[in-house]
Amino acid sequence: MSRKDNITTIFPKHLFWDMDYNKLDLERDKDIIIPRALFASTLDTFESDIKILEDIYSKNEILNTLKATKERISNTVCELVAKRYRAKKFARFAL
């Protein structure tokens, strides 16, 4: 996939329920798209969810965006991303 692809052909609309889905741009809105793409990810779906992102964004873009996001990404997803990229473990919520 290239960054010129239309988001509506890549991600389900329900992930962007609170915004105009058709106006999202893969490059400009990556701070929204990356966390939302992993928002509902589980141990069972993580592999396929992350591969979609990796077709569009670099590992550094994914990792850095998740570290900085205010979106409600589970600590489990954060751990899976850190492990996949051999990065220092990080969490969105303190335990």
Image (cartoon, rainbow, N blue to C red):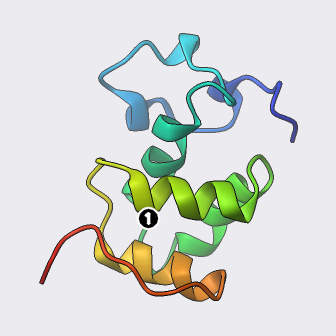
- The residue at the far right in this view is 2
Q: Quadrant of residue 14?
A: top left
Q: Residue at left 41%, top 38%?
A: 15
Q: Residue at left 37%, top 50%?
A: 69
Q: Position of residue 51 (x, y in %)?
A: 71, 63
Judge left or right: residue 72 versus residue 26: left
What residue is disc 1 on? 41
Q: Quadrant of residue 16?
A: top left
Neighbourhood count class around disc 1 (C-alpha, 10 Å): few under 14, some 14–19, many 20 upward: some
Q: Is residue 22 above or below residue 37?
A: above
Residue 18 is at least partly visible in this image: yes
Q: Position of residue 42 (x, y in %)?
A: 41, 72
Q: Amino acid at mark 1?
A: Ser
Judge left or right: residue 87 versus residue 71: right
Residue 38 is at least partly visible in this image: no
Q: Position of residue 60 (x, y in %)?
A: 68, 62
Q: Residue at left 80%, top 27%?
A: 5
Q: Is residue 8 above or below residue 71?
A: above
